[in-house]
Amino acid sequence: MKIVLRDDVENLGRKGDVVDVADGYARNYLVPRGLAMKATKGVVAQAEAMRRNRAARDARDREAAQTAAATLAGARLEITARAGEGGKLFGSVTSTDIAEALQARHGLTVDRRRIALAEPLKELGDVEVSVQLHPEVSATLTVAVVAG
């Protein structure tokens, strides 16, 4: 059965895509949950409009991410943390702390899950951190953990 997706469905397609699925999958799962509708001539035209809107939105998002990446390229972000002897922190600096510092200092809202931090920072010093701003755009910045 040919259907038009009304929302992104993992392992199937994105909003506005026309896909061919098994009749039972469409009737029993996709359509009742509002994820898809049967592909008719009018619906296919509507799906084309959805795809055009999605492409325009993706282009805007990519452009904004590239602008943000240019801002972050080579940037140094200082985070103050309490530390004991030998530079060991009382606690740690997490991706949430980095996201909050980016928001406060650069005005960039970044989801903490987009910050590539293998494990929380537990020592003073500089660390290179990668931030995934868009599926096609990432930036690397230096996070400096200083005693405070």
Image (spheres, rainbow, N blue to C red):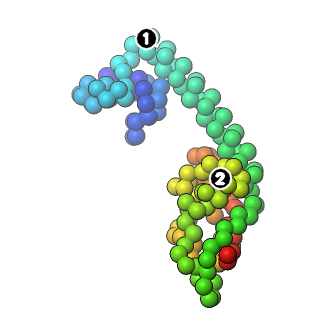
Q: Earlier in the sequence, mark 1 or mark 2?
A: 1
Q: Which mark is residue 41?
A: 1
Q: Residues within 10 Å of mark 2 (few under 14, many from 20)?
A: few
Quadrant of image for the C terminus: bottom right
Q: Position of residue 144 (x, y in %)?
A: 69, 70
56 or 78: which is nearer to us? 78
Q: Residues within 10 Å of mark 1 (few under 14, many from 20)?
A: few
Up-down: is 103 above or below 26?
A: below
The residue furthest top is 42
Residue at point 66% right, 71% down?
Answer: 80
Helix, strand or loop under label 1: helix
Q: CA distance from mark 1 to mark 2?
A: 46 Å
Q: For the residue marked with disc 1, what is the amino acid?
A: Lys
Q: Which mark is residue 103?
A: 2
Residue at point 55% right, 51% down?
Answer: 111
Classify residue 88 as left or right of residue 20. right
